[in-house]
Structure formats: C-alpha cells, structure tokens
Amino acid sequence: MTATEQARLETVEEHVRAENAHDLDTVMGTFSNGASVTLNGLATPYDKIRKSYEKRMFALPGFRFEVKQRHFGADSLIAEHMLHFTNQKGQSMEVPVCIVYCFDAAGKLSDERIYMNEAQMT
C-alpha cells in the first residue's frame, strides 16, 4: 500500500467511525470545503451535507456501517459496506451499500458517491 493509499484509508476509517458514533463534527471534518455527497445520482452540496447526515443517522435506529471490502482507484477508494439499522416495523435490516470516496490534494473527501437500493430502507 502506498503512502497516499494509507492516508486515504485513514481518512475513510475516521469518516466511518464518526458515522457509526453519530459524531457529525468529525464526519464534517473529513470533507473538504466545497465537497459534495451524491446518493444514487442526486448530489447534495457542501452546505447541506450536515443536514443530510442528521436525517439519515437519526432517522434510522441502530444506524451503523460494517466495512466488507475496500478497493483503491487512482484518485479514489471504493468501499463495500453493509448498512445496519432497525426499520419502522422494529426489524433489524441489512442493506448493501457501495461508496466511492474521492479525495482532494490535501487528502480530504471531495466527493462521496453512495449507491444503494433505497427500496430496502423501509
């Protein structure tokens, strides 16, 4: 693993730990200014990312990511996750998620592209 890949991995690990701890300040600290989050093709600009995270994290009891696999690209890290949460019926759910993490020159997240079947979220 190169030094750049190691630094990117550390950023993503910090990001996921913060998501699982529902620590929005740390989550936001992993993003560069001007970053975006794209969920199934719908982009959320930087100034609305925090609110988007608040909705997802706190609307789903037991919200946490389990990392399954990681793959390095030239300017990105691709991660396969399992999203765990409790749905409105009180059932434990597991939804596979693929996230492409893109980085700026300083090693911060410039884009987080999330792909998942949202129909499984209910």
Image (tube, rainbow, N blue to C red):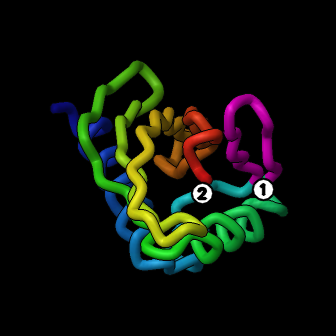
Q: Which of these two is toward me, 92 or 73?
A: 92
What type of secondary structure mainly makes up the magenta span? strand
**Residue density around tag 2, few if under 14, some if 14–19, many if 20 or more, within 10 Å:** many
Is 74 on the left or on the right of 120, as rendered? left
Estimate the spatial distance between the alpha carbons at disc 2 and disc 1, rounded to whole Å: 9 Å
Residue position for label 2: 31
Q: Quadrant of residue 80?
A: top left
Residue position for label 1: 46
Q: Is residue 34 above or below residue 119?
A: below
Q: Is residue 36 above or below residue 60?
A: above
| Residue range corresponding to the magenta coloring | 34-45
Labels 2 and 1: the sequence-earlier one: 2
Q: Quadrant of residue 119?
A: top right
Q: Whole-percent x and y of residue 103?
A: 53, 39
Give the residue drawn at x 71%, y 69%. 55
Secondary element at tag 2: strand
Q: Amino acid at mark 1?
A: Tyr
Is 20 on the left or on the right of 113, as rendered? left
